[in-house]
């Protein structure tokens, strides 16, 4: 009796744990003559990709295309992306949108698909050799960093000859988006605003509480701090909470990145001076349009632009409500 | 077989006392950081340190109970994440339905505790009924919890909860915030329970010799279940604390929390083998960890050095344990590990 | 044969683990104030019999009677509560706990009033009583608040036996209590067994050290291949005949 009960309990526990753990591969419904396009992206947890998925789903619906959306739940790494990409190719989609986590490691997948007659579009990042790839569509992170520098300079009323202390909160020292944004920011500051000194940098590993700790300590360390560039959403959340808790919201310029629904309202309330928004939905839409044109061999296939850079936009108090709504990422 | 111990001299026993050494380390750190940057010695910095310490000490104390019982809980970090986001979802829904802020926060707190009880119960069932070793059992719930937090939120932070949440994390009591005071109170109660209550006694006994504990009539499985549930509930409370701190539930909150908790316990002088250790050591261990974070930022050392400093602290703590367990004769656990094959 | 009343009895007990027959039709009587030596080669079924007697395992067949009443132990705790104490080989104590915490493990004394109801311990009382109880059975431990890991091997074993003897109200089962002990320490342990006997307890003493068995027991039960092959007063054995009976060279 007792052992039977124990057994049932343990089975229940295992089942509960398993149901929590299972993130299975979705199988596409191969409806007759319906095009299936596979998206193999970086990390599902990144709202950037979530926003991209919203754009992809909308365009897929409009074009009558089926989307297979796959990527590691959390880790942005070729080690996890490669097996996923292989499994997706085995499903034989008609087109592939690849967001390679590594330019070299994912080249084989890129070429394997093309060799099998599956056209490939690279989005956001690209493989080393793009010669056979249909197109490459990306946002401009360096330009976003430069725009952030402009926004901070405007907010603090930058005047030549004076010095201003600014800090940068990053998530990772190596992620290409972080690096490009920081490079763009640093270059713009050096060129246009030499009075702005970047006095500190720290990494949050995508944990907002860590970003919050960093900003709290900076606020104590630099009582005359002029501005904060929060390079991604987690740093933005940490910095916004620190400024609000210390009653400094609006007194210190805060420029964030990515237009999450949780932070867009904080522009109006003055916590964020500005947000730099990308347009991942537009990237996905264009990727699908390119692939559909190639698959259906339409006239548009001949005029596909091989390299597309979709610029980042700056959202401020002056931005119209309609534009704010347009660029706000759709999230759960 | 150990020989009878000679009564140690007072000074020797003071230095053999891990808590005393930890206090010395803490004072030395404060002195060093203050020397390099006088701003360090201020209410504002202590406030920053205690704000970081509050959630870390919660999971560290939970981890302490688990480790003393002879187990390990790797799921505390992801329990912070999952409780934080589920509670954020519920508070967002309550706010949208115009439920009062205090009521919303209270229900959000209950949600975190409930998620803690759920995760702890799953851990307990896996360990005591399915007989999976704690490392693997809690590794499972760690992965599942972190995955669920991401799946549920799609990676986004969940906000739009009660507006007053952020005001609660402001330090009102010297360097401590109101939630910080509550956490100090909780830790104090657990400290008394560990030292003076049957619950603490059984935790030590099971970690020391679970066979003897069972033979003495202790319901070992039931007790272990309580210990794992306690650990997860404390992690759930930490999840709620992070919500108050940030006004959002973030799926990445608590990432690496299990390592912080284990580091605090080990630095606090508790042996991973179980059966022994002082809760006050863990409290100080957590305080040292968070002091390092703020200190390094204040003296212009890249915060990534924190990991190196923490690694050194862990190594020193283990060496001290080694020394204390052998009186310097060099036959402690590390020595035995190193010479195991030669015997 | 001892004339005290029959305290603890197993009747026709068999135990099998799957297809392995560990005990076959074992019957055994233990009287009050009697010390039985249980001997046998490795694999003879001693540990299985100890597990049945201590409540760790239930017999596949046969019954266990305490004070003439049939009992069924669902756990060692059941047996413990009924007055049957078992001292397991080498694993009876929690080394990190103090002597008194070990003596009172699972039977803690609580503070008076509300705190006690909440599980708070009366540690000073336990320290004092543990010291007294151990002294009563002839064990002198310098400080009962000292951690067991600081005691010598002999002292640890003495504490473990002292604990079992001071709690046992009826029967005490000692599994290899003199293992790994020096001559003097083993002598102390055997003295404690005599104390228990004087207090009217029934003692089952399991050991490989035959001189100890011959020295301290009233009756010797020899197990071989899961069966009792001899059950006779100790006076009828000498070292040689006992060894012969265990190995099967002498049929008794």
Image (spheres, helix red, strand yellow):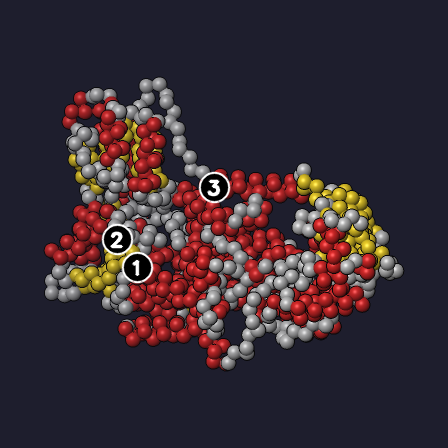
Q: Report if the CB atoms under discs 3 and 2 are less than 8 Å apart.
A: no
To which residue does mark 2 refer?
Answer: A173
| Marks 3, 2 in one chain | yes
Task: Specify whether C3 is left or right of A318.
Answer: right
**In this picture, is A328 found above or below B106?**
above
Q: CA distance from mark 2 to mark 1?
A: 10 Å
**In this picture, is B22 found above or below C73?**
below
Q: Which tag is nearer the camera, tag 3 or tag 1?
A: 1
Q: CA distance from mark 3 to mark 2?
A: 32 Å
Q: Position of residue A180 (x, y in %)?
A: 20, 48
Pointer 1 chain: B
To which residue does mark 3 refer?
Answer: A20
Q: Report if the CB atoms under discs 3 and 1 are less than 8 Å apart.
A: no
Residue found at the very far top of the displayed protein: A32
Task: Specify whether B282 is left or right of A248.
Answer: right
Q: What element does badge 3 sit on? A: helix
Q: Position of residue B133 (x, y in %)?
A: 52, 49
Sequence-wise, which precedes: disc 3 or disc 2?
3
Q: Counting other residues with Cα less than 10 Å from the Cα at mark 1, is it few (<14), some (14-19), or many (20 or more)?
A: some
Residue shown at the point (40%, 69%) measured from the top left: B175
Q: Which mark is residue B304?
A: 1
| Marks 3, 1 in one chain | no
Q: Nearer the viewer, residue C216 or B142?
A: C216
Q: What element does badge 1 sit on? A: loop
Q: Position of residue B44 (x, y in %)?
A: 35, 69
């Amino acid at each position: 009796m007792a052992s039977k009960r124990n057994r049932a309990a343990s089975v229940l526990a295992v089942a509960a744990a398993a149901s929590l753990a299972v993130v299975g591969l979705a199988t596409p419904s191969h409806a007759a003559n319906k095009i299936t396009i596979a998206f193999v992206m970086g990390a599902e947890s990144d709202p950037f990709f979530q926003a991209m998925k919203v754009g992809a789903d909308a365009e897929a619906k409009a074009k009558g295309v089926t989307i297979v959306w796959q990527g590691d739940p959390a880790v942005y790494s070729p080690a996890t992306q490669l097996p996923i990409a292989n499994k997706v190719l085995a499903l034989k989609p008609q087109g592939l949108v690849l967001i390679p986590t590594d330019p070299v490691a994912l080249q084989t997948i890129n070429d394997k698909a093309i060799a099998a007659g599956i056209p490939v579009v690279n989005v956001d990042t690209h493989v080393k050799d793009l010669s056979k790839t249909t197109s490459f569509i990306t946002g401009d992170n360096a330009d976003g960093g430069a725009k952030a520098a402009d926004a901070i300079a405007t907010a603090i009323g930058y005047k030549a000859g004076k010095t201003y202390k600014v800090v940068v909160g990053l998530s990772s020292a190596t992620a290409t988006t972080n690096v490009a944004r920081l490079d763009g920011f640093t270059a713009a500051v050096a060129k246009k605003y030499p009075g702005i000194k970047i006095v500190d940098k720290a990494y949050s590993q995508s944990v907002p509480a860590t970003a919050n700790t960093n900003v709290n300590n900076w606020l104590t360390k630099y009582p005359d701090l002029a501005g904060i560039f929060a390079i991604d959403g987690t740093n933005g959340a940490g910095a916004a909470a620190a400024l609000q808790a210390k009653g400094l919201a609006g007194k210190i310029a805060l420029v964030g990145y990515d237009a999450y629904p949780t932070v867009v309202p904080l522009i109006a309330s003055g916590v964020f001076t500005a947000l730099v928004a990308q347009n991942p939905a537009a990237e996905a839409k264009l990727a699908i349009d390119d692939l559909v044109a190639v698959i259906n061999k339409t006239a548009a296939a001949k005029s596909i632009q091989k390299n597309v850079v979709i610029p980042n936009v700056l959202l401020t108090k002056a931005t119209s409500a309609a534009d704010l709504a347009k660029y706000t990422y759709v999230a759960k | 077989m150990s020989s009878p111990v000679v009564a140690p001299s007072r000074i020797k026993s003071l230095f053999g006392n891990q808590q005393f050494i930890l206090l010395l380390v803490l004072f030395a750190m404060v002195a060093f950081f203050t020397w390099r940057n006088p701003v360090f010695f201020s209410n504002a910095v202590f406030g920053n340190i205690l704000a970081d310490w509050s959630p870390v000490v919660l999971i560290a104390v939970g981890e302490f109970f688990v480790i003393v019982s002879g187990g390990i809980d790797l799921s505390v970090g992801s329990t912070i994440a999952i409780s934080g986001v589920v509670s954020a979802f519920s508070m967002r829904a309550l706010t949208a339905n115009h439920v009062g802020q205090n009521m919303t926060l209270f229900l959000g707190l209950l949600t975190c505790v409930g998620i803690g009880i759920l995760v702890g119960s799953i851990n307990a069932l896996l360990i005591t009924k399915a007989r999976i070793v704690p490392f693997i059992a809690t590794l499972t719930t760690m992965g599942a919890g972190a995955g669920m937090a991401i799946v549920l939120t799609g990676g986004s932070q969940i906000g739009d909860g009660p507006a007053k949440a952020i005001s609660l994390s402001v330090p009102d009591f010297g360097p401590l915030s109101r939630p910080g005071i509550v956490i100090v109170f909780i830790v104090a109660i657990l400290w008394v329970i560990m030292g003076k209550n049957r619950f603490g006694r059984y935790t030590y006994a099971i970690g020391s010799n679970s066979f003897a504990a069972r033979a003495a009539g202790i319901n070992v499985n039931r007790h272990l279940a309580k210990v794992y549930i306690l650990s997860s509930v404390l992690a759930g409370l930490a999840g709620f604390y992070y919500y108050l701190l940030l006004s959002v539930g973030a799926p990445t909150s608590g990432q690496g929390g299990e390592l912080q908790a284990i580091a605090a316990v080990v630095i606090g002088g508790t042996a991973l083998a179980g059966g022994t250790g002082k809760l006050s050591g863990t409290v100080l261990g957590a305080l040292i960890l968070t002091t390092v974070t703020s200190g390094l930022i204040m003296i212009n050392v890249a915060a990534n050095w924190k990991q190196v400093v923490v690694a050194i602290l862990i190594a020193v703590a283990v060496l001290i344990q080694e020394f204390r367990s052998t009186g310097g004769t060099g036959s402690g656990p590390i020595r035995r590990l190193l010479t195991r094959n030669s015997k | 044969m001892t004339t005290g009343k029959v305290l603890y009895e197993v009747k026709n007990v068999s135990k099998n683990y799957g297809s392995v027959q560990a005990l076959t039709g074992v019957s055994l009587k233990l009287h009050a104030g009697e010390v039985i030596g249980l001997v046998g080669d490795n694999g003879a079924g001693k540990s299985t019999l100890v597990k049945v007697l201590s409540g760790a395992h239930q017999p596949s067949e046969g019954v266990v009677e305490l004070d003439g009443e049939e009992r069924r132990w669902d756990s060692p705790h059941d047996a413990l509560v009924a007055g049957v104490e078992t001292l397991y080989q080498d694993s009876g104590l929690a080394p990190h706990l103090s002597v008194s915490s070990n003596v009172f493990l699972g039977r803690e004394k609580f503070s008076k009033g509300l705190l006690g109801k909440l599980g708070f311990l009366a540690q000073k009382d336990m320290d004092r009583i543990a010291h007294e109880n151990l002294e009563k059975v002839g064990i002198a431990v310098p400080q009962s608040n000292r951690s067991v890991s600081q005691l010598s091997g002999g002292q640890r074993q003495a504490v473990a036996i002292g604990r079992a003897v001071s709690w046992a109200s009826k029967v005490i089962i000692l599994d290899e209590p003199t293992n790994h002990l020096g001559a003097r320490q083993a002598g102390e342990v055997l003295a404690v067994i005599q104390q228990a006997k004087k207090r009217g307890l029934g003692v089952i003493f399991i050991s490989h050290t035959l001189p100890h068995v011959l020295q301290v027991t009233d009756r010797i039960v020899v197990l071989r291949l899961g069966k009792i092959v001899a059950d006779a007063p100790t006076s009828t054995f000498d070292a040689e005949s006992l060894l012969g009976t265990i190995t099967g060279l002498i049929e008794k």
